Image (cartoon, rainbow, N blue to C red):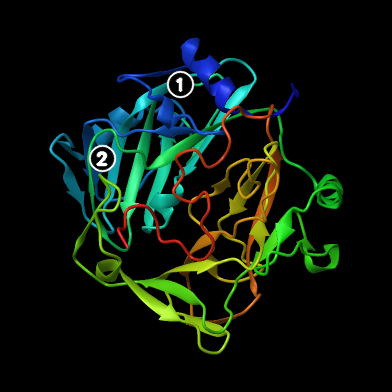
Amino acid sequence: MDTRGVLVSQNIRTLIERGNISSVVRIEDTQIQNSSLDMTLSDQYFELDAAFLPRPGEKVRDLMRELGAKSGNLSSGVIFERRKVYVVPLNERLSLPPGLLAEANPKSSTGRTDTFVRLLANGHQNFDKVPRLYEGELYAMIVPHSFNIRVSPGISLNQLKIIKGSPKIIDRDLSNIMYRNHLLYGPNNIPLSYDDIILNNGIVMRVLLEEGGVYYKAKETNKVLDMTRNGANRMADFWDKRIIVDGSIVLEPDEFYLLGTYERLKLSPDLVAKVEAIDVDIGEFRGHYAGWVDAGRGYGEQGDGKGLDLTMEVRHFGTPFVMRNKQLLSRLVFEMVLQTPDRLYGVGSHYATSNGVTPGKYFSD
């Protein structure tokens, strides 16, 4: 076992057995992914007028009272209105042993609905970070942007990574990995040459906007997107499906898009990747919400995979912006795992074999 890396499925089970990860309800085996743990909503929620972060020593529950939050119960299912702020205590809590910290991000299906989910920890002044030796409750701050959403207890909107040491892979080592393995493929299923890969503090991914291709733009609608069960919503109620006609599209300010990457990523089971959400060097837009790419994505059962592209959740800021085929879209930072996971990517995943822009598991068509 390495001395640094992202903990994987068998390590997460050990932490559960030891009580370092606990829950007010049973932790189901389906919550344990190959390099993350799905977090679940409790039956309580708070509604606020604005987002916030706790200062050192402040507990989130105490802040709910100080900020005048309205409380409610999720048991019968509740509609969270777009552009409002909600805080839901999570069922899971942490008692981190020495040497470990945690990071969270929205699940892929959450990000693809333009639902912003950030993790809060008592007394910690950063979203989505849990410091070493943390002990206590965790909370999800939920802000639906494009759609009203229906939620209920037990559903999972975000996931937690447990990390030991500093797992980031620097460019020099990443270059060696690319030489040894076919890390990136093009849309034609042929491995990209080293000269066709942009290496800059990670790998820069490009957008695929070939003529005749498809992308999606969120509709302005008051319909409620049901996130309590898969396949409960019609695509046409929430998305404009658009055909690319000249190798380019125009991103409109404060609109939400689903776009695909030119590169198809083939991650071996000993690597994970993290998507940087905003990189102002390549444009005034947020390039991704969900954040993590699990170990083994696009690898295949025996390493015979040809990679899978990424569906990117894009929100543009500022003036209208012309985006053209193979333009820079986001950056992937790579990290090592602590050991090879005993659960391969794709077990139960909606996206295990999907190429092309994929809106998410909540839609039936």
Residue 18, placed above or below residue 87: above
Q: For the C terminus, which image quadrant?
A: bottom left
Label 2 neighbour load within 10 Å: few <14, some 14-19, many 20+: few
Closer to the camera in the image, 185 or 326: 185
The residue at 50%/21% (across/down) is 134
Residue 40, x across and y down, in percent? 34, 33
Q: How far apart are marks 1 and 2 (CA)?
A: 25 Å
Instruction: Report the amino acid beneath label 2.
Output: Leu
Query: Where on the picture, by quarter, is residue 279?
Result: bottom right
Residue 293, x across and y down, in percent? 58, 47
Residue 31, x across and y down, in percent? 42, 31
Find disc 2 in the rendering and name its residue.
Answer: 67
State which mark lies toward you, 1 or 2: 1
Residue 4, placed above or below residue 239: above
Q: Is mark 1 on a helix, strand or loop?
A: strand
Find disc 1 in the rendering and name its residue.
Answer: 94
First in residue order: circle 1 vs circle 2? 2
Q: Can residue 356 be seen in this view?
A: yes
Label 1 neighbour load within 10 Å: few <14, some 14-19, many 20+: many
Residue 121, x across and y down, in percent? 43, 31
Q: For the N terminus, which image quadrant?
A: top right
- Find residue 81 and name its label: none
Instruction: Report the amino acid beneath label 1.
Output: Leu
Q: What element carries label 2?
A: loop
